[in-house]
Image: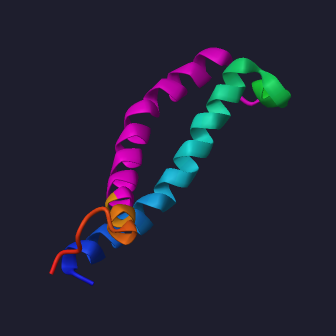
Amino acid sequence: MSKFNFLCLKTVRWSGWPLLPLVLLFLLTGYIMDGRYGFGRLLDEKSALTFHRMLHLPLIALVLVHSLPAAYLAFQRWGWIRQRA
């Protein structure tokens, strides 16, 4: 395994852990805003909307950091991209 592939693999693994609670928070604030399943009692709608909007940029950044190296490694594995020497 080349150093670049190793770096990509470590990036995918390490970015997945902060991505998991971030996605859960994003979903939770969405359900709080909507009031479904009793989550509306946790926080008022305006605060949930503010928090939800603050999560957009970190979520997009982490999804890109996680998915681009993962896609690169998958394309290599499938033979669509030649492996680096």
Q: Nearer the viewer, residue 47 or 10?
A: 10
Residue drawn at (44%, 40%) of the image? 59
Residue 33: x, y in percent?
Answer: 67, 20
Q: Nearest the camera: 37 or 74?
A: 74
Most extreme residue toward the left is 85
Which quadrant would residue 42 be assigned to in this image?
A: top right
Does 22 sit left or right of 59 as displayed?
A: right
Quadrant position of the N terminus in the picture: bottom left
Q: Is 4 rendered above or below residue 34?
A: below
- Residue 7 at x, y = what percent? 27, 72
Most common secondary structure along the magenta stretch: helix
User: In the picture, residue 30 is in which quadrant?
Assistant: top right
Residue that extends furthest to the bottom in the rendered view of this protein: 1
Compared with residue 74, is residue 65 higher up or lower down, i.e. above or below? above
At x 30%, y 67%, the residue is 8
Q: Is residue 52 above or below residue 12?
A: above
What residue lies at 80% left-to-right and 24% top-to-bottom? 36
Quarter holding the C terminus?
Answer: bottom left
Q: Is residue 9 magenta?
A: no
Examine the image and state in which quarter residue 29 appears: top right
Q: Which residues are magenta?
A: 42-71
Q: Is residue 17 above or below residue 45?
A: below
